[in-house]
Amino acid sequence: MSQIKPERLINEQGLRIDGRKPDQIRPIKLEVGLLKNATGSAYIEQGKNRILVAVYGPREIHPKHLALPDRATIRCRYHMAPFSTDVRKSPAPSRRELELSKVIRESLEPVVFTEYYPRTTIDVFIEVLQSDGGTRCAGITAASLALADAGIPMRDLVVACASGKVDGQIVLDLCDLEDKFGEADLPVAMIPRSEEITLLQMDGSLTPEEFREAFKLAIEGCKQIYAMQKEALRKKYIAVKEVTEEETVEASEKEG
Amino acid sequence: MSVTRETEVIAKIKQKQIADLISRGRRLDGRSLFDYREIKVETGVIEKAEGSASVSLGDTKTLAGVKIEVGEPFPDTPDEGVLTVNAELVPLASATFELGPPDENAIELARVVDRGLRESKAIDLKKLCINPGKKVFVVFVDIYVLDHDGNLTDASAIAALAALINAKMPTYEIKAGEIELKPEYVQLPIQNYPFTVTMAKIGDKLVVDPIIEEEQVMDAQITVTTDQNGNICAMQKSGPKAFSVAHVLEAVDLAREKAKHIRAILGV
Amino acid sequence: MPILVEKRQLVTPGDLIAEGNYLIGESTFREGDKIYATRIGLVDTDGRSVSVVALKGSYIPSVGDLVIGKVIDISLSGWVVDINAPYTAILHASDAIERPFNPQRDVLTSIYDIGDMILAKVVAYDRTRNPILTTHGPGLGKITRGRVIEIVAAKIPRLIGKRGSMINMLKRETGCHFTIGQNGLILISGRSPEDEDLAVLAIRKIEEEAHTTGLTDRICNLIREESQKRGVSNVSN
């Protein structure tokens, strides 16, 4: 089923087709450590996006000639499931998936202490189970959590968010329709502590002033999502801590 | 799957030399930080192609060929012609290019050049429509990198654009429901021009048009494509490390400035 | 010059832990005079150094470590051993047998075969090559009885406890013998499978709750309750 362009992407009240305000991100749900086999894993839902990320490693790399003598190799695969889009996507890797695998790897590599594990590989597998715009950003956000869950040493998490222009207005976190029928799309990934940019792409048409505004908005979006990432990591371990603190209280009450 | 690649081992002394020079506003080949190398463009070099251009950017050499065929439109744009851009990093161009189908670097290169052409709407694709939903002109742009001395992106983008400007497409008549191509040729309907400028970050500075040694020591690079109105139509950060926010903003301003230089070279 | 978080506080990669002249320990890095966490874990400090006890992280071999490994391949001159690390380990024939070695494949398989579990020591490891093991030494060699279980290597110190408090309690309460590999593998050898079951249960709980306080007592109580429930009798009761 192909998509038809909606008459307006932003209505008279200034709300977008899914009811959001221009600077609002879609609802996000994050889960960490949900796969048994992977060294680390994470799952993200952002609007209708559903993306699962697994990390394996550091482990020995085969074939051996791909090994780097002084640090770990990172292997990254971004892949969309055939049923993830409106029109079925062929399972064979497309040129887009190959480009995205590269830029996503380059967005994560700057934070990983690869020099701690020479001659090994750290594998990041990003599977898009359902796609609705902004999957590379959501994938990067989840991949950071999967790397942390795997115990891979990092300088910081990496977080990503896209902004763009729709019906002449600068908006945050575009869904698929907005990306297809809007005027510009700007995905950004950054290292939140140092505000360094590790992924930046843009397509469409923006004046330099519009670019500055969109760029700033994407960075704002990144900061909001960073707080959610930290929360997701804490939640996983604090829950166990709380349960056992209850048990300790119960135990001491019994004895007392 | 994308795999971290071993770049050639660079002597530490050389890295230091490049960094020192740059901190004093100069580069290995004597250029200032924001200068392009000498750019030469020659068009119409491949007669059998509908359009072609050969570009040398310093010692980097690229060749772009345009082939125009009649084909079917995409289902969601039935009244538009088709533009497709492909790039090959052929093994003869560098010891680091391996035999095989286009790898992630070739694909990224093609897609960045494509974005510049597509988002600037350089070609009025509606004028390539012959019979809506059934027949349109398909424009193939194939970029061949012949010698790699850095900044393949800009050299490829200039070649692609020059080849399109040089290209001639056939005219046609519809006789009894059949498309008959006539031997009279016209220019492609070009209505805008994308100018692609690539900058590398080395230490704390940006340099325009990185030469291969600079690419081997850089933190990362950024390509900014602007059109004839100064609007930004494509951007791509590439490379193993990161840019500061300030560098990104500086790169955008710098790209708009340097676009004028490319524009002058192409004479548009 | 402060330590900015409480001891045992949970931190995530990139969290600022301290500012100043502290020595940096595990799972931390320094940028200027600021110290940050590189992994998820609990902050630990003795006032002079700052480290993070990671909740997850691979085992990095250290010379002198006792490890439990599985033989996965045989080469002309020795064995390749999986020690649950990013690198496989090598055991040369000369580090396994007392007399000079005569390279015949049959001889090697009769010492250690593919699939054998061995207790070994790390004798060499650096960034340029895989860890080298030896089975020369008392108690080292093929594991013939008992059960081997695996926990996250980072939690081995918690299993041992301060001055051995946790592991001694486990020995006492379950009557089992424990051999602890620094690589996260533990050999449990008890007088009955039921004793070993109890030990496994206790160790799993320790792994899950490694980051909490009062653990030794809670595990002790757990073992006593479970052994009553299961009608298992053991040494201490």
Image (tube, coloured by chain):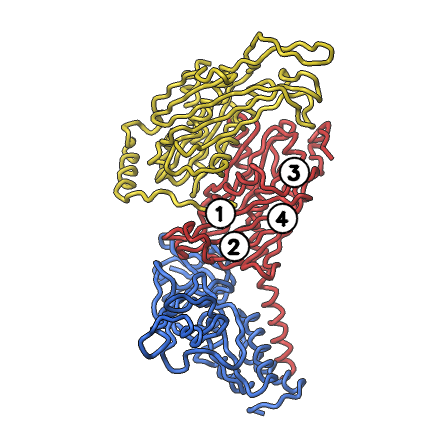
Chain colours: A red, B yellow, C blue
Vertically, is A87 above or below C35? above
Query: For the point 70% across and 17% down, which residue is it?
Result: B131
Question: Residue C176: x, y in percent?
Answer: 53, 85
Q: Quadrant of residue B71?
A: top right
**Of marks 3 and 4, the one in the foreground:** 4
Q: CA distance from mark 1 to mark 4?
A: 17 Å
Q: How many marks?
A: 4
**What amino acid is labelled 3 in the image?**
Cys
Chain where mark 3 sits: A
Question: Mark 1 or mark 4: which comes first in sequence?
Answer: 4
Question: Mark 1 or mark 2: which comes first in sequence?
Answer: 1
**Cβ atoms under marks 3 and 4 closer than 8 Å:** no
Instruction: Check disc 4 and report the residue beneath it.
Output: A51
- Disc 3 secondary structure class: loop
Query: For the point 42% across and 20% down, which residue is it?
Result: B54
Q: CA distance from mark 3 to mark 4?
A: 15 Å
Q: Quadrant of residue A116?
A: bottom left
Q: CA distance from mark 3 to mark 2?
A: 26 Å
Q: Is residue C175 left or right of residue B131?
A: left
Q: Nearer the viewer, residue B255 or A79?
A: A79
Residues at marks 3 and 4, common chain?
A: yes
Question: Mark 2 or mark 4: which comes first in sequence?
Answer: 4
Chain where mark 1 sits: A
The numbered dot on residue A147 is 2
**Cβ atoms under marks 1 and 2 closer than 8 Å:** yes
Vertically, is B29 above or below A88? above
**What amino acid is labelled 4 in the image?**
Ile
Q: CA distance from mark 1 to mark 3?
A: 23 Å
Instruction: Check disc 1 and report the residue beneath it.
Output: A108
The numbered dot on residue A175 is 3
Q: Is residue A8 left or right of residue C170?
A: right
Query: For the point 71% across and 29% down, which residue is it?
Result: A5
